[in-house]
Image: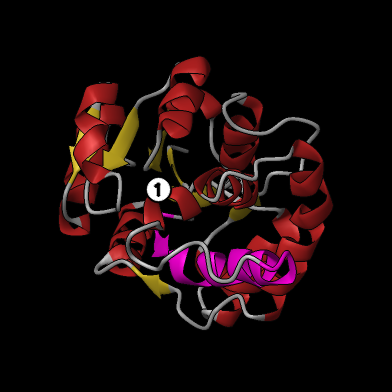
Amino acid sequence: MRTVIFDLDGTLADTSGDLIAAANVCFRQMGLGDVLEPGRDAGIALRGGRMMLTRGLERVGQFDADVIARYYPVLLEAYGEAIDHHTVLYPGAMDAVEALKTAGYGVGICTNKPEGLAETLLTRMGIRDAFASMIGADTLAVRKPDPEPLREAARRAGGDPALTCLIGDSDTDRKTAAAAGVPSVLVTFGPSGEDMAELAPEALLSDFAHLPETVARLIGPAR
């Protein structure tokens, strides 16, 4: 079976609002107030919790690796408690997923979000059952850009890892697909969309309505 594997944050859903809120819980505990701003800092948020803490502390001239290590679990706890207050699916995302499944592709998720948090978010959004596999940052001993999480997501979706493509939004996704020897499709509607062309993926995607035809071109029809 041919499979299509999706990144989560910044690809299927804009999770930046809830991520920034969790980071600001940490900054308030540090006595710094709300350092990150929704919208303005969405691109930072979608690069993960440690990056938010790093950029926030750099912004106020207080970078400290020990502080980041100490507050990262605090951030994860805060995020888990309010994981779906602001998160929204990108327009057409689930329509594209269903169209791919109807065409005969297996679909799964490969994210660098911790598995438990990813499972919680997908369940609360009511879309977990749409995906045959879900590999998080801590599901395996390695994470993206190592190719094994992508390959395992394809396997668990019932597919051949050599006959898959990765839909993502970052250089991490581009490197993951390249390491696996499969094509990547990078979305241009996220906060870092204008930078995607420079990564030279096999395809760029501005609208989920075009994804099924893009996938068929890159890895062939499912049947």
Looking at the image, residue 143 lies above or below residue 38: above
* Structure colour scheme: secondary structure
Instruction: Write the residue at 32% across / 64% down.
Output: 93
Instruction: Please indicate whether residue 66 sits to the left or right of residue 220 in the image.
Output: right
Quadrant holding the C terminus:
top left
The structure residue drawn at horizontal position 45% and vertical position 74%, both measured from the top left corner, is 87
- Is residue 11 covered in magenta? yes
Using the rendered view, name the quadrant where residue 64 is placed: top right
Query: Which of these two is toward me, 120 or 82?
Result: 82
Question: Can residue 59 be seen here?
Answer: yes
The residue positioned 55% from the left and 72% from the top of the image is 21
Q: What residue type is labelled 1?
A: Tyr
Q: Is 77 placed left or right of 86 in the picture? A: right
Instruction: Give the residues in magenta.
Output: 10-31
Mark 1, residue position: 105
**Does the stretch in magenta take in 103?**
no
Name the one closer to the observer, 19 or 130: 19
Q: Quadrant of residue 14?
A: bottom left
Please count the marks in the image.
1
Q: Which type of secondary structure does the marked residue at label 1 adopt?
A: loop
Please provide percent x and percent y for residue 84.
Answer: 54, 79
Of 37 and 137, nearer the camera is: 37
> Residue 66 location, x and y as percent?
82, 41
Q: Residues within 10 Å of mark 1 (few under 14, many from 20)?
A: many
Name the magenta segment's main secondary structure: helix
Residue 57 percent coordinates (x, y):
60, 48
Name the residue at 74% across, 30% down.
Answer: 142
